[in-house]
Image (tube, helix red, strand yellow):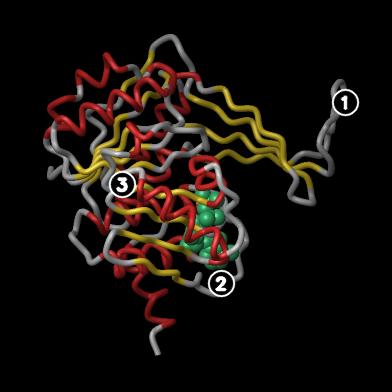
Amino acid sequence: MRNQIVVVGSSNIDLIAQLSHLPKPGETVGDAAFSQAHGGKGANQTVAAARAGAEVSFITSLGNDSFGQSMLQDFKRIGINTDYILQSKDTPTGTALIWVDTRGENSIAVAPGANHKLSPQYIDECRILLSGAELILLQLEIPFETVEYVIDLAASLGKKIMLNPAPARKLERKHLKPLFNLTVNETEAAMLSGMPVETQEQVVEAGRYLLAMGPEMVVITLGARGVFYLTKREQKMVEAYPVKPIDTTAAGDVFCGVLASQMVQNKKLADAIKYANAAAALSTTILGAQPSAPNQQQIKDFLDQYEF
Ligand code: ADP
């Protein structure tokens, strides 16, 4: 199997209770509707990249439990290379316990579980896989020392590195300098730049600041406002597609995975952004994180609707 993208990241099972109101300490709310879905930023982006046509290998750590087994089966079914997935014997699969009330307010408890087993030592065992990659895609839902280790190793191997620093945290120049692509949402852009990122001017300013930290390109996703991207040679604000969203969970993950899939096909940046913007908009019209990642045909059909 060709090895275009290697994602190093998290896998979580999302256990969701939709209830009339969020329980207070000591309270039992008995009217919940339960659902479960495969999630985790690493897994979501892996699935999105694979559905968009890339050959993807996933380095993640699952528990040796039924959730882990079912995720592994799903990755295989989608055609993802699972040879380097770790299955921890003594730690459960990462779990997000999510309560959502009728107004869409939520409370979330995340138990990282097996995600914490993704250690720098394990990355050493994946060196051959990483050496063969065209692009290495990372988020921040695994131990930070592992993220740093992968960035250093990938840079020493001369690999293209794409970082989606989510959940948001402060990073240093040494983390951003080796990047080929930094993709952030407004919160992450504000956290990394230390600047407000609300108005169009502020978005541009934060983008310039982040580009000056060293990445070859910076992409700022702006939810329903679209995307801003810049390199040393070009910068552009691109509007979002006018869809009626029903669930924006993982829109950013779909955007990142699909953008990565286009980067390894050497698409022009403007075209790659357009494709990812379309895929992410489409994903907001479908319920669930991984189920909402569209395939190539769905993205093509969606784009055709908007070509006049
Ligand atoms: P995150 O999920 O990380 O917060 P964003 O909310 O910025 O990321 O969304 C990522 C991308 O998803 C946007 O840049 C856009 O392409 C698409 N998107 C998100 N919300 C909408 C929306 N309401 N309408 C159309 N596209 C959207």
Q: Quadrant of the C terminus?
A: bottom left
Asked if the residue at tag 2 contacts the one at tag 3, i.e. Cβ–Cβ closer than 8 Å, the answer is no
**Looking at the image, is 154 positioned above or below residue 64?**
below
**Looking at the image, is 25 positioned above or below residue 190?**
above
Considering only order in the chain, which callout, 1 or 3, is on the residue closer to the N terminus?
1
Residue beneath disc 2: 243
Q: Quadrant of residue 136?
A: top left
Left or right position of 136 against 3: right
Left or right position of 2 against 172: left
Left or right position of 222 against 63: right
Asked if the residue at tag 1 contacts the one at tag 3, i.e. Cβ–Cβ closer than 8 Å, the answer is no
Q: Position of residue 293 (x, y in %)?
A: 43, 55
Can you tell which mark lies on residue 215? Answer: 3
Considering only order in the chain, which callout, 2 or 3, is on the residue closer to the N terminus?
3
Q: Position of residue 163 (x, y in %)?
A: 36, 41
Q: Is residue 283 visible?
A: no
Confirm or reject: label 2 Cβ below 8 Å from ligand 1: yes
Q: Residue at x 30, y 44 (%)?
A: 214
Q: Residue at x 36, y 50 (%)?
A: 211
Considering only order in the chain, which callout, 2 or 1, is on the residue closer to the N terminus?
1
- The crowding category of the residue bearing disc 1, from other C-alpha atoms within 10 Å (few below 14, some 14 to 19, many at least 20), is few
Q: Is residue 263 visible?
A: yes
Q: Position of residue 56 (x, y in %)?
A: 25, 44
Q: Secondary structure at mark 3?
A: loop
Residue beneath disc 1: 27
Residues 177 and 260: in front is: 177
Query: Which marked residue is nearer to the observer: mark 3 or mark 2?
Result: 3
- Please state which amino acid type lies under the numbered disc 3: Pro
Q: Position of residue 245 (x, y in %)?
A: 60, 64
Residues 214 and 227: in front is: 214
